[in-house]
Amino acid sequence: MLIQRLAGLLCAIAVVGAAALSTAISARADDSVTASDGWVSGRVTKEEPGHNGEQTRRTKDTQPSTQSPPYYDPLDCVRPVGAGAAVDCERDLPEPASGVELLFVPPTEAEVRVALHLPDPTPRFGPDPSVNEWKMLAVGYPIWLWTDAPTELSATATHDGLSMTLRAEWTSTSFEMGDGHTVTCTKTTEYPKHPDRYGAPSPTCGYTYQKRSKPGHDYTVTASTHWRVSWATGGHSGTLTSTYAGRRMLPIGELQALIRG
Amino acid sequence: MPVPRSVAFAVVTALLPVAGCVETPPGPLPQATPSWSCTPVAGGTPYACYEHQYQQTSAQNKLYEEAEAVYRKYHAEDERIFRLGGLTEPSQVLLETTTDAYLREAMAEYRGLKENHGGLIKGTYGIAWLKPLPDTIRAGFVATLEVCTDVSEATFRGEGGKPYQIGEDNAERLYFVRESELLKIGAADHQRVKSC
C-alpha cells in the first residue's frame, strides 16, 4: 500500500516537470505574438501618409549630403546657421528669444519604458504549477524563479520632436513571494526542459515555501525587473533606472503521505 | 502511525527516477471541485473554476468593460473634434478620458488642425474591432486595449485645404491608468495597417 501511494506521488511530480516543458513552449509562443514588430511608440494620428510618417522619412542614403540645399537629418532636426526655412525638419525647433536659452527636458522613466517594450515581467515558476492536476506547487519543494529574456534592449523613440536612442540593461529582479519574503536575483535560470534531478534547487534564483497558502487566498508573487536605461537625444544624454513589474497568483499546498501499516 | 513529512518527501524525491507512470491515482490534495464558471477576459469559452478565480476574472472583466467605455467615449470626442477642425484647449471629455503623454499628443494634433484649418470633411472612421490584452500590462498602467479604426475611407483636409485620404487603417495599443478614480488613456503604441 505504501509503495502504491509513493508511486502515485512520484507520478504526480513527474507530470508537473514534464508539463512545465509544454507550458514554457506555449508561453514563449504567446510572447512572440504580443511582442510583434511594427509598433511605434506614441498615439496614432490621422496625418496624410507621407506627411510626417516613418515610411516617408528621408534617409542619408536617398539624400546625399553633397546636394544643395545641404542635407540635414530630419530626425536630428538640426538647423545650422543660414539654412533658413529650406530645412525639412520633422518638427521645427522654436527659435529662442533673444537672451533666452531653450530648456531641455530630459525623458521621463514612463516615456522610456513605453518606448522600450521591456520583456514581460510576469514571474515564471519551475515546475509550472498550472499544468499539474492540483494547479499548485508544494511546501518544501524548491521553486525556480525567472522572468522573460532578453536582458539587453535598444530602441529609438521620439522625444520632444527629436529622435532619441535608448539602450536598456537588466540589472536585477526582486520577487516578492507573497508570504513576507523577498528574493532578489542578479542572475536567473530558466527551469530546464529535462531536469537532471527533480527537486533540485535553482543554481541562481529560487525559493522554497515553508507554509501553504490558505484556501482561496493564493500567494501573490510580484516580480519587479530593474533596468538601467541610457538615452541620447539632441546632443544630450543620460541614464535613468526603470522598474517594470508583473504579478502571478501561486497556490502552495502540502504533500502528505499516508502510511498504513 | 504517520511518518514525518520531511522523511516522506525525501523518500518521494529519491524514488522519482525509478517511478513508473501508469495512471495517476486520486491524491490526498484538495478535495474542492471547481463549481464556478469563469469567462476569459480576452474572450473564449467559459471554463469551470474556483470561487476566488471567478472573483479575479470578474474584476478584470469589469475593468476591461470600463476601459472599452472610456475608449469609445474618447473616440467619439476625437471624431467630433476632427469635424470641428481642431481645438486649442482640451475639452471636458478629453480631460475625463485621457491624461499624460496621450493627452499631450492628442492636443498637439488638435492644435495643428486648428492652425492649419484641417479636419474631417467627409465620411467617418469607426472602430473596426477592439480587444483586451490582459497579458500585456505595462508597469504603471492597469489595462491594455488594442483597437483598430477604419480611417481608410474618410476624407480629411490637410495643410492648404488639400483633401486627402489615408488609404490605410490605424491600429493602436492603449495603456490605461487610474487617476482620481477615473480610468484614462495615458499612453499608446500604434501602427498603420493595410486593413483592420
Image: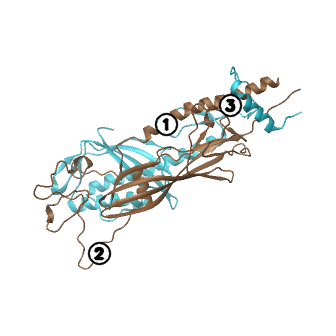
Chain colours: A brown, B cyan
- Tag 2's secondary structure? loop
Q: Amino acid at mark 2?
A: Glu
Q: Chain of mark 1?
A: A
Q: Measure how far apart labels 1 and 2 are at the Cα level.
A: 49 Å
- Quadrant hosting residue A110: bottom left
Q: Position of residue A210 (x, y in %)?
A: 74, 46
Q: Measure how far apart labels 1 and 3 are at the Cα level.
A: 23 Å
Residue at the spot of label 2: A101
Q: Check chain identity for marks 2 and 3: say if they share one.
A: yes
- Tag 3's secondary structure? helix
Q: Position of residue A94 (x, y in %)?
A: 24, 68
* Depth order, front residue of A140/B95: A140
Residue A28 — which label?
A: 1
Residue at the spot of label 3: A13
**Residue sitting at 41 percent across and 44 percent down?**
B146
Q: Quadrant of the N terminus of chain A?
A: top right
Asked if one can make out residue B55 in the rendered structure from this viewpoint, the answer is no
- Tag 1's secondary structure? helix
Q: Amino acid at mark 3?
A: Ile
Q: Quadrant of the C terminus of chain A?
A: top right
Mark toward the start of the polypeptide (1 vs 3): 3
